[in-house]
Amino acid sequence: MIDYSKLAGQSISALTPYKPGKPVKELERELGVTNSVKLASNENPLGCSPKVIAALNEFMPEISRYPLGDAFYLRKAVSEHYGISGDRLLFGTGSNEIIELAIRTFLAEDECVLSPSPSFSVYGIISQAAGKSCKWVPVNDAFKCDFEALANAITDKTRMVFLANPNNPTGEYFTAEELEAFMQKVPEDVIVVMDEAYIEYADAPDFPDTLKMLDKYKNMFLMRTFSKAYGLAALRAGFVIACEEAIDMMNRVRQPFNTNMAAQVAAEAAIKDQTHLKAVLAENQRGKEFLYSEFEKLGLKYVPTQANFILVNVGNGEKVFDNLLKQGVIVRFFGSGLAEWIRVSIGTMEENAIFIEKLKEVL
Ligand SMILES: Cc1ncc(COP(=O)(O)O)c(C=O)c1O
């Protein structure tokens, strides 16, 4: 008998795999319900731009060809959109792959990453899978990043800090001033990866304009995705903006055809349609205001969000999560540290109304 857990090694056999939100069809099959609503994975409820669909349809006859290894057209579109050189961009299969590439490229055997907690669990999973570790530094009672504790947690073994802004699962954010003060304390050879998966939704006036900080801080990476506001989660497209030297190193590690061609075609069309993006953001704002006001009427505490989801205190998170599930509404429950909370993605106005109706019943 082969003991595969032994072959994989201790850090992999001890891994708890990432648990994604249940797909709607699976839930409906399991519970025998119909018309269920998935507000669990922070997806874009309006979907992608119609121009993306048109571009994909046009591309379809070409799927027998390998993708462009350098993502030429997508690179051009993104570089024009942000006004940065294409040499400062690297694309990946979602920002998940960028996390992996960054860790694999820059972490030596005994080095570790650091992140506030709670945040995106994938930082820990990928670190552990790569035989490294992730040190989590708790946020404060108001779910704000504790930058002092974070700076103090940096040791000579810390190579990378992941900062999700806005943060997931809280929706909280930190300001330009806070980030600037933190960067001053971070040693030059510790890479700060800004995970900006939800940045398009952020509208706080003091939200950091990190693109402007890149020239000053060569150790800052910006990670972005097409999965959220651009509505391309299924296709897997993300990218990182960093200095050319860092991109050059990660390019050596990445697989030659890592970003599939459908994703490239779709992402290019998506970033070129800023009108659709505006509509998505407006719908999110409407949903956010509706949910805030309903939570207030119900006397539920929530964390004001800069993203497309809201963390809300429902008393017994697990029970409410389970009961909502039975009603065909899928939200997210995280357990430890967030036992009283559920996270709900902001849906269409219709989905939001169904969620509130079912929540009232469940409570
Ligand atoms: C904070 C954060 N970063 C990154 C991602 C990953 O996104 P992608 O679909 O680009 O891999 C997510 C997805 O949920 C996220 O919440």
Image (cartoon, rainbow, N blue to C red):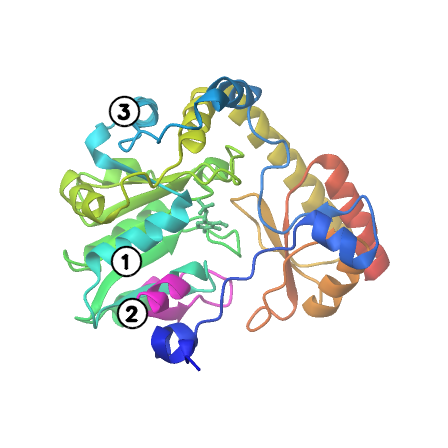
Label at residue 83: 3
> What is the quadrant of the C terminus in the image?
bottom right
Decide: few, some or many residues near mark 2? Use Cα within 10 Å; few <14, some 14-19, many ≥20.
many
Whole-Å distance between the Cαs marked 2 and 3? 35 Å
Tell me the residue that label 1 is attached to: 103
Decide: few, some or many residues near mark 1? Use Cα within 10 Å; few <14, some 14-19, many ≥20.
many
Asked if residue 96 is among those painted magenta in the image, a careful observer would answer no
Secondary structure category for the residue under label 1? helix
Q: Which residue of the protein is positioned furthest toward the front in this rendering?
A: 1
Q: Residue at x 42, y 28 (%)?
A: 64
Residue 196 figure quarter:
top left
Q: Which residues are magenta?
A: 124-147
Q: Nearer the viewer, mark 3 or mark 1?
A: 1
Q: Amino acid at mark 2?
A: Lys
Residue 287 figure quarter:
top right
Q: Is mark 2 within 8 Å of ligand 1?
A: no
Mark 1 vs 2: CB contact within 8 A: yes
Q: Amino acid at mark 3?
A: Gly
* Nearer-N-terminus badge (1/2): 1
Secondary structure category for the residue under label 3? loop
Front in this rendered view, residue 3 or 285: 3
Whole-Å distance between the Cαs marked 3 and 1? 27 Å
State left or right for residue 182 relative to residue 66.
left
Front in this rendered view, residue 317 or 224: 224
Mark 2 vs 3: CB contact within 8 A: no
Q: Position of residue 356 (x, y in %)?
A: 78, 49
Residue 146 in sight in this render: no
Tell me the residue that label 2 is attached to: 132
